[in-house]
Image (cartoon, rainbow, N blue to C red):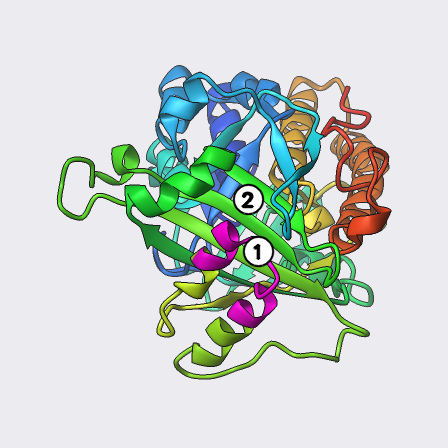
Amino acid sequence: MAADQVIICGAGVTGLVLAHALKRAGTSFAVYERDQHIDARPHGWGITFHWALRYLREMLDGPTLEAIDEVQVDPDVGRNDTGNFLFLNLASLDVKFRVPPNERRRVNRQRLRKALLRGVADDVHWGKRLVGVEPLSAGAVRAVFADGSDARGRLLVGGDGSGSPTRQFLVPDGHANYKLPVRMMGVALDLSPADAQPLRELDPLLFMGCHPETGNFLWVSVLDTPETNGSGGTPSEHYRVQVIISWRVADEDADPVPTTTDDADRVAEMKRRAGGFHPRLRSVVDNIPPSTTVTEIALQDWPCQAWDNQGGRVTLMGDAAHSMTMYRGEAANYGILDVWHLSRAIQAIRSGRKTQSQAITDYEAEMRQRSVPAVLLSRQACLDAHDYRSLDENSALLKKRAMQAAE
C-alpha cells in the first residue's frame, strides 16, 4: 500500500470524481466503500448539475464526460434545455414563479455512479466500512475497517455521506445532523407515455409547487425515458417518474410518517395530502398502487464546523462536510466544487508550493466560508417551500442557483 497515497472513504459521486481528478494528475489514491458492491443499496433518484458543470468538465476526461451526457434522464431534453424550474400553485396549476435558469444536466444517479466507476474501478475496494482513524508518525494516517483490514496514506478524505464516520472522528461531540420539522415521502412510478404526457407538458424534466391552503409541497421529476430505459417501441414502453410530497410539522417528533410492512398506509397518506391538488396532479398520486415502495427521506443538514485536521491528514468533502436539503438542488454542485478545490490543494502539496497542513487548512477555510451560507439557505428554502403565500422572488427557494466564493 503506497504510503503517500490519498485514501478516499466513500464511492459516491464526490468520491469517484475525486478519484478521476487524482488519476488525471498522476496522484496515487485508493477508494474504500462500505457497501459490498455498487448495487448494494438504492442509489437515490436524480441529480441536477448546474453551476458546477464547468468544474466537472475540468476534472473528468473526454470519455467520462460523454458517459455523463449519456446518463441524462432525457438526453433529448438535455440537447435543447432552457433550464427553467417551474414553481406551481398546486391547486390551480398556475405558474407562480419560474426559477432563474442555468445550464443544467439532470442525470440518473445510479447510472452516473456506474459511469464514473468505469474509469477507476480497479482502485475501488468494496465492503470496507470505516470504524477508526489513526494519525501516525511522519505525517501518515491509518484507516481501520470493520473487516479488520486497514489502509495507510498521506491524506484521508471523508466523502462518506451525511452520516460520515470520518466526520464523527473529526467532530465527535458535534457530528449529528440537524433535523428539520418537515416530513417527506416519495415514490418512483412507471407511467405509460399517455399518462406521463400531462406532466411533461408542464416541464419535460421536473417541476415543483405548493398548495396555497395546506402548505403541502410536491416535486415531480423524470428519472428515465423510453429512450434511456430501453422500453421504446415495446409493449411496455414507459417513463419512470419520481413523485415526492412533503409537509411541515409542529416539531421534529410530531406527525410521524406511517410505518407498515406493505407501505399501504404511506401511499394512503400521500393520497390524502394530494386531495386538494389540481386534478392533473392529483390523478397521478391517486393512481399510485397501494403496494408501491414508499421511501421516507430524512430532511436534515449539517453546516460545516471547525475541526482538527491532524496536521492536514484528515478532511471532509461533499455531504460529509456540509449536508443540505434538496430544495435548492445544490448539494451535488457544492460537492463537485469541494473536489475541485481539494484536488488543487493536493497538487499544491505535491509540487511543494504549500505544506500539507497549510494546503488542507486553506481548503477547509474556503469550503466553510462558501458552504455554511449554502446549507442555511437550503434549510430556509425547505421551510419556504411549504408557505405559499410568503414566497416571493427573494425567497431562499427561488433565488438563482449560483456558486459562492468559488474562486
Does the segment drawn in magenta span residue 145? no
Q: Which mark is residue 143?
A: 1
Q: Is residue 27 visible?
A: no
The segment highlighted magenta reads 270-283
295 lies left or right of 273: left
Q: Which residue is mark 2?
A: 7
351 lies left or right of 28: right
- Magenta residues, dominant SS class: helix
Please state which of residues 10 and 54 is positioned toward the viewer in this rendering. 54
Circles 2 and 1, Cβ within 8 Å, touching? The answer is: yes
Q: Which mark is residue 334?
A: none
Please state which of residues 129 and 75 is positioned toward the viewer in this rendering. 75
Please state which of residues 160 and 307 is positioned toward the viewer in this rendering. 160
Q: Is residue 157 above or below residue 131?
A: above
Q: Quick one: SS at disc 2?
A: strand
Q: Position of residue 1 (x, y in %)?
A: 45, 44
